[in-house]
Image (tube, rainbow, N blue to C red):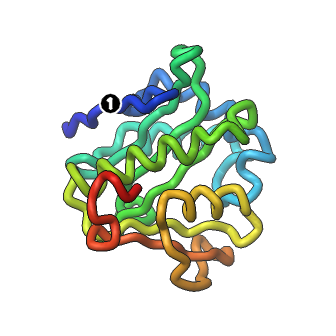
Amino acid sequence: MVVLPSFETERLYLKPRTMADLEACLAMDRDTEVTKFIPGPWSDPAKHEQFLAERIKKSFGPGLGYWSIFPKEQPSQFVGWILLIPYDGHGREIEIGWRLNRLAWGKGYATEAARRVLEHAFDTAGVDRVVADIHPENQSSIRVAEKIGLTYVGDGMHDGNPCKSYARTRKDYGGHDSV
């Protein structure tokens, strides 16, 4: 089993997501504002739990997976997660994504965590290109993608829903200082 590294940022701890985070993830996803732009089994408790448990237990490859986010000021308080996984969980491209509890919105946590995971993707995990598909109405996530240097590459469809596609290559990244 591949062990993910933990990370620290100025205000956050990013720890590999484990089954201990399951209940917090389930509770976050039950908030319809949190999952408004994300298709999933959120309204079916059994399917939702199975979906999350499978994602938590799955190995996505060296340096890839999900990290739970905890603020340093309250290190036991789960505020969300960030992912760096093969596109749709199995594709050849690597996607970055984030989901945070409403209590963590507007604090810059998603951007701070995503910058650190993007740095890891290029500097440590050897990823060549990172992508993010974001619902066109999800302006907060679009801003996060832009703040971490992802570039809009076009409109598309993801899970049968419209999306705006963003990407960044290792070549464009150019090292730690540019994120």
| Image quarter hosting the C terminus | bottom left
From the viewer's perspective, tell me whether residue 143 is left or right of residue 17: right
At which x and y percent is residue 65?
36, 46
Q: Residue at (62%, 41%) from the top-left corner?
A: 108
* Name of the residue lying farthest toward the right: 33
Whether residue 45 is visible here, answered yes or no, is: no
Q: Is residue 89 above or below residue 1?
A: below
Q: Does dot 1 land on a helix, a strand or a loop?
A: loop
Q: Which residue is mark 1?
A: 6
Q: Is residue 16 left or right of residue 80?
A: left
Q: Residues within 10 Å of mark 1 (few under 14, many from 20)?
A: few
Q: Amino acid at mark 1?
A: Ser
Q: Residue at x 52, y 16 (%)?
A: 75
Q: Residue at x 47, y 64 (%)?
A: 149
Task: Identify which residue is drawn at 44% across, 68% down.
Answer: 131
Q: Foreground: 83 or 18?
A: 83
Task: Answer above or below: position of 7 versus 117.
Answer: above
Residue 90, how many percent across, how many down?
35, 63
Q: Quadrant of residue 159?
A: bottom right
Give residue 120's position: percent from left, percent from top. Answer: 30, 48
Q: Quadrant of the N terminus?
A: top left
| On screen, residue 125 above or below 20 | below
